[in-house]
């Protein structure tokens, strides 16, 4: 048994247990009809004779368990980090004996967590990246125009097509469409389909002899297929000119020239890269410091974290109009497989949390009420809400203190200057 596991028996004696059984009887008796008595008026001895004292045990246990658990916490001076395990060792009409299994935080032994010799990249932005970002912005405001009939399909165009698929001269179920809008280069269709349309014109009829990929659905993988395609229309995206009107469309009233736009885009990309590099550096520092640390994690702690992650995942699915059963159906997985998939991330999160908490303890990081209060006000202003609204979301000032303490511990690990 691990050092952080505490097993404690606690007995609920006759007086308290009898009182709990009486309360359970009063609750049960309200809905019971016994011959010779009005509903809810049968004496306790008659009720027990008919239903047995055991019928009261579950409600009585619900009544006494919280106080028993509180007594165990006080006697063992424990602060469990996950749900306790509860066993009923013995139960009768005179007493009940509980056995609680509590799991406290495991012992953490820090290794090297400073001067980790991890090199942080330097953010750079090339002219090519700036040009690509400007093209992306142009594409957002591009207009779709129909090409002339003698124009050919090019990469990036949208071809409006009728198509039919055949396998061994038999029509492919679900393999046909009319006036289908296909963006060339989107890889919507199997390899060779879109490439086979490049250079074709309106009213061209094309036959494409292709093969379904090896990783396609079992019934079609590696099978040869003939697609008969008729091109009805070709559309192309016309990018806007880079001028004052384009700057205004982007909401950049302060931009006058192309160079101004490039400078603005460069600053944007630089900030984004710096944030990405900072996140990567923090992750590398945490990973290195955690690998230097010694901690023996209980399975129960890991399971508790995984269940928390699955609950968060379910909430995310709800926001997309889905539920966990939909996800299992779409992915061909189940709760057990999802649990297994999430376990490595759960272990990493737990280790990072214990690492930061231990660094906070060793470094004697303390956050005052005023510092936390000032931080709450700053956060509320950033979110555009009142401080009271923020505190309702966070719960209390201790949560903000904890978050600040963890951030300060991370700063120390990263070696950042205040």
Image (cartoon, rainbow, N blue to C red):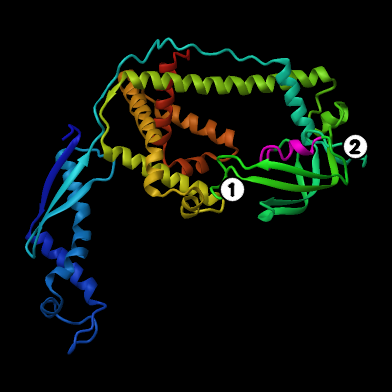
Q: Which residues are magenta?
A: 187-198
Q: Nearer the viewer, residue 329 or 231?
A: 231
Q: Is residue 258 above or below residue 321?
A: above
Question: Which numbered disc flags the more N-terminal residue, 1 or 2?
Answer: 2
Q: Which mark is residue 220?
A: 1
Instruction: Tell me where residue 407 sits by quadrant.
Output: top left
- Asked if residue 160 lies left or right of residue 314, the reply is right
Q: Is residue 136 magenta?
A: no
Whether residue 136 is visible here, answered yes or no, is yes
- In the rendering, which numbered label is found on residue 184? none
Check the image and name the residue furthest to the front.
168
Q: Nearer the viewer, mark 1 or mark 2?
A: 1
Instruction: Return the mark for residue 151.
Output: 2
Separation (CA) of disc 1 from disc 2: 35 Å
Q: Nearer the viewer, residue 382 or 206?
A: 206
Q: Residues within 10 Å of mark 2 (few under 14, many from 20)?
A: few
Is 203 left or right of 11, judged from the image as shown? right
Q: In the image, is 168 to the left or to the right of 289?
A: right
Q: Position of residue 113 (x, y in %)?
A: 36, 15
Query: In terms of depth relative to the viewer, which is nearer, 397 or 320?
Result: 320
- The reply to whether residue 81 is visible in this rendering is no
């Amino acid at each position: 048994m691990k050092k952080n596991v505490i097993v404690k028996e606690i007995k609920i004696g006759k007086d308290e247990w009898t009182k709990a059984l009486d309360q359970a009887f009063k609750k049960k008796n309200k809905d019971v009809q016994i011959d010779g008595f009005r509903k809810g008026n049968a004496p306790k001895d008659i009720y027990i004779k008919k239903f047995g004292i055991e019928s009261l045990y579950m409600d009585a246990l619900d009544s006494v368990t919280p106080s028993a658990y509180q007594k165990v916490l006080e006697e063992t001076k424990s602060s469990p980090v996950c749900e306790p395990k509860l066993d009923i060792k013995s139960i009768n009409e005179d007493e009940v004996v509980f056995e609680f299994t509590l799991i406290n935080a495991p012992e953490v032994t820090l290794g090297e967590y400073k001067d980790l010799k991890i090199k942080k990249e330097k953010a750079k932005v090339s002219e090519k990246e700036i040009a690509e970002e400007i093209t992306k912005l142009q594409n957002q405001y591009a207009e779709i125009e129909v090409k002339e009939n003698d124009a050919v399909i090019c990469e990036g165009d949208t071809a409006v097509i009728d198509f039919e698929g055949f396998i061994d001269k038999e029509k492919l179920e679900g393999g046909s469409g009319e006036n289908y809008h296909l963006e060339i280069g989107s890889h919507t269709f199997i390899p060779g389909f879109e490439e086979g349309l490049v250079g074709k014109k309106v009213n061209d009829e094309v036959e494409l002899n292709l093969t379904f990929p090896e990783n396609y659905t079992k019934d079609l993988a590696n099978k040869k297929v003939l697609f008969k395609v008729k091109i009805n229309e070709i559309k192309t995206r016309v990018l806007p000119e880079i001028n004052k009107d384009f700057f205004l469309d982007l909401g950049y009233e302060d931009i006058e020239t192309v160079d101004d736009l490039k400078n603005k885009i460069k600053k944007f990309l630089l900030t984004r890269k710096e944030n990405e590099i900072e996140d990567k550096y923090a992750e590398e520092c945490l990973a290195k410091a955690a690998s230097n640390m010694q901690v023996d994690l209980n399975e129960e702690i890991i399971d508790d974290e995984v269940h928390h992650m699955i609950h968060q995942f379910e909430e995310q699915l709800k926001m997309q109009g889905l539920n966990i059963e939909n996800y299992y159906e779409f992915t061909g997985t189940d709760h057990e497989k999802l649990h297994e998939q999430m376990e490595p991330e759960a272990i990493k999160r737990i280790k990072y949390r214990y690492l930061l908490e231990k660094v906070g303890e060793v470094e004697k990081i303390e956050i005052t009420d005023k510092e936390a209060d000032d931080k709450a006000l700053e956060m509320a202003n950033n979110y555009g809400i009142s401080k009271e609204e923020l505190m309702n979301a966070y719960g209390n000032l201790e949560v903000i203190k904890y978050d600040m303490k963890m951030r300060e511990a991370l700063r120390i690990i990263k070696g950042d200057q205040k």
